[in-house]
Amino acid sequence: MTQELIPPHSRRGSKYAARTVPVSETGERLTTSAMIASLDAEGRATVAAPFGHALVDLAKFRDDIVGLTADLSKYTDLHVFAKAYPEKFYQMGMAEQVMISAAAGLAREGFTPFATTYAVFASRRAYDFICMAIAEENLPVKIVCALPGLTTGYGPSHQATEDLAIMRGMPNLTVIDPCDAIDIDQATRAIADHPGPVYMRLLRGAVPKVLDAYDYRFEIGKARLLRDGGDVLFVSSGFMTMRALDAAENLAQEGISCAVLHSPTIKPLDATTITAEAAKGGRLVVTAENHSITGGLGEAVAGALMRAGVHTPFRQIALPDEFLDAGALPTLHDQYGLSVAAVTASVKSWLAA
């Protein structure tokens, strides 16, 4: 096999350094699509568009539910709602600030708006509009955003690796990072009843179903212990809870016992449950998140432990504080330490140190 040099972006060394792509003997590039919005669900059942279908179910009984999107209904699963309730759907075009302002206006008139876009556009482009038009007034707007963290290979323009850090600093805003289709379905219904504004990350398309095996029930502001163990305590959110559960199975085969505490609410954090579990002692506490190591779940948990006076060995599994490469998701998850194999290896190395 030969290697072909191509010049686009690389985050190794110089920003514009050449990188290599494997090619076959016939010269064909051995690459996969960079844009993979649905996670690999090999061996797992999946649910199609759980957010869109949950919103449709809510609208059957609630006239106040409306949906808005910034030209991304298909890619945030809001097209399911738009098809069922076209009279309650608003296509705002590529104008996130306008969408947020319109959602605020609808909320003032008694509606419960669900506004969807990509996480990068809500957290970076529309931040001031969310802050001034929605959060300061504590309006019940639900901002639901696809492509959180490293769930696309399109590079920094689409990878919202810092959205949790941005949003958890905003007063009045509840921040949710659900794990799977079960979590998304239940969280959508819960945030519809929540009286204030919410920012929720979204896995879309064919979303794996995991938490139904753990007698799980989503509740805003609550972490749930999915499995117990005596050597390691994972505190995780988003799809990294799936990875923590899989890594725990791998580690169990080597005699390492792992607990997994799923914390889908980043703000308000369930500091009571987290500190109580960490305080049991004798376990390495490992936070696992699909977000930058800066300002997300890991630092929120570390702060909670310090304030509670809980001192325990602590490590973070998270994305680096840098702009990430573009590429295929399985490769990037290995590269940046989010794959099951990488999580397993990291925990073993920390225990051996």
Image (spheres, grey):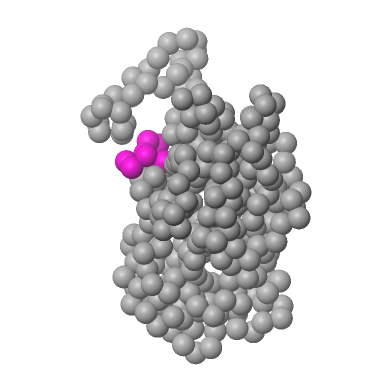
* Tally of numbered tags: 0
Q: Is residue 56 left or right of residue 140?
A: right
Q: Nearer the viewer, residue 155 or 274?
A: 274
Q: Which residue is drawn at 47% across and 51% down?
A: 310
Q: Position of residue 308 (x, y in %)?
A: 45, 58
Q: Where is residue 276 in the image (x, y as percent from the top left)?
A: 57, 55
Whether 220 is among the magenta residues is no
Picture quadrant where residue 45 is located:
top right
Picture quadrant where residue 131 is located:
bottom left
**Residue range (magenta):** 319-326
Q: What type of secondary structure mainly makes up the magenta span?
A: loop
- Classify 103 as above or below 289: below
Q: Position of residue 248 (x, y in %)?
A: 64, 36
Extreme residue toward the bottom, this view: 109
Q: In this view, does 15 lie to the left or right of 238?
A: left
Q: Which residue is drawn at 37% across and 53% down?
A: 295
